[in-house]
Image (cartoon, rainbow, N blue to C red):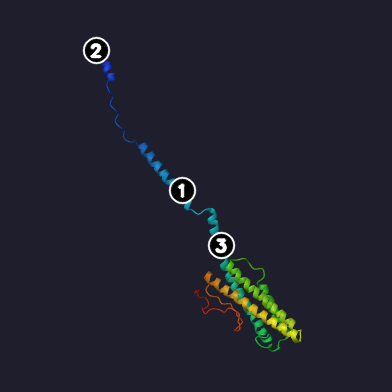
């Protein structure tokens, strides 16, 4: 073939349109890359949801403190109930004696009360006051019950002091002092009944059931009285 023919063939070869390369199937590397990207996105999304829904460290600490406080309050309620029962036993002789010595709706009762009797009342009342000294801090309802009972025993101690002073008086001054002591006793009984009612309520809430630690009262004194539910019952 001549040089001219060879050149024409080369030009025809250069100008021939090229066929597009066939599409390559997705390689294993690209598939793995896509799978990794999807998994990473799922992990990131899950982490966001977990981060939003997981309690923060502050919330966890608050929940732990609330649980510890509730447990501590249950212990305080049991201890306070035992203290109230022991105090009631200690005060009953004092109340029986004051019922004889102080006027109710009428004149003063029999004066067959000795100085030794009064001294026993003073000691019993002082011991009751001491039993409520330096109280621990608890939940609000428990604090209300404890404070009411503590206030009541202080009023009983004041009642005994007033009666002791009245014994040294005569005439109208004695009658006025005895009347004051009687009103102080009534106030102490009423305050104790408030504390006993609050104590009953916190015992129910704590799961211990009804606990009735009331002092005996007379009709017309206005003090709160226990309900008819049996001891240990969980009926509100």
| Whether label 1 touches label 3, CB < 8 Å | no
Please tell me which of labels 3 and 2 falls first in the chain: 2
Real-space CA distance between mark 3 and mark 2, rounded to the nearest whole angstrom: 103 Å
Q: Quadrant of residue 199?
A: bottom right
In screen coordinates, is 64 left or right of 33?
Answer: right
Q: Earlier in the sequence, mark 1 or mark 2?
A: 2
Please tell me which residue lies in front, 90 or 20.
Answer: 20
Query: Residue 69: percent from the left, percent from the top?
Result: 57, 63
Residue 171 lies, in percent from the top left, at 75, 87
Residue at the spot of label 1: 48
Look at 69% across and 77% down and name the residue there: 157
Q: Position of residue 27 (x, y in %)?
A: 34, 35
Is residue 55 placed above or below 199 in the rendered structure?
above
Q: Secondary structure at mark 1?
A: helix
- Is residue 83 at least partly visible in the picture? yes
Secondary structure category for the residue under label 2? helix
Distance CA(mark 1)–CA(mark 2) = 73 Å
- Separation of disc 1 and disc 3 at Cα? 31 Å
Q: In the depicted view, which residue is nearer to us: 7 or 40?
A: 7
Judged from this view, the residue extending furthest toward the left is: 1
86 relative position to 172: left or right: left
| Vertical order, 36 against 181 (above or below) | above
Q: Which residue is mark 2?
A: 5
Q: Nearer the viewer, mark 3 or mark 2?
A: 2
Q: Which residue is mark 3?
A: 68
């Amino acid at each position: 073939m001549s040089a001219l023919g060879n050149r024409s063939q080369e030009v025809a070869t250069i100008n021939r349109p090229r066929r597009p390369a066939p599409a390559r199937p997705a390689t294993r590397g690209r598939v793995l890359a896509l799978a990794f990207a999807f998994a990473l996105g799922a992990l990131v999304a899950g982490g966001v949801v977990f981060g939003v829904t997981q309690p923060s460290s502050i919330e966890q600490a608050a929940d732990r403190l609330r649980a510890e406080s509730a447990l501590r309050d249950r212990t305080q309620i049991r201890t306070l109930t035992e203290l109230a029962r022991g105090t009631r036993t200690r005060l009953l002789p004092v109340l029986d004696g004051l019922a004889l010595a102080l006027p109710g709706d009428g004149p003063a009762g029999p004066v067959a009360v000795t100085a030794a009797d009064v001294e026993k009342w003073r000691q019993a009342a002082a011991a009751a006051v001491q039993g409520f000294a330096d109280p621990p801090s608890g939940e609000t309802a428990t604090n209300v019950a404890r404070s009411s009972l503590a206030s009541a025993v202080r009023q009983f101690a004041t009642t005994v002091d007033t009666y002791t002073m009245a014994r040294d008086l005569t005439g109208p001054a004695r009658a006025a002092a005895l009347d004051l002591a009687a009103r102080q006793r009534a106030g102490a009984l009423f305050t104790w009944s408030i504390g006993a009612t609050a104590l009953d309520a916190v015992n129910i809430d704590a799961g211990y059931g009804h606990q009735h630690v009331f002092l005996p009262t007379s009709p017309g004194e206005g003090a709160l009285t226990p309900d008819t539910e049996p001891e240990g019952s969980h009926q509100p």
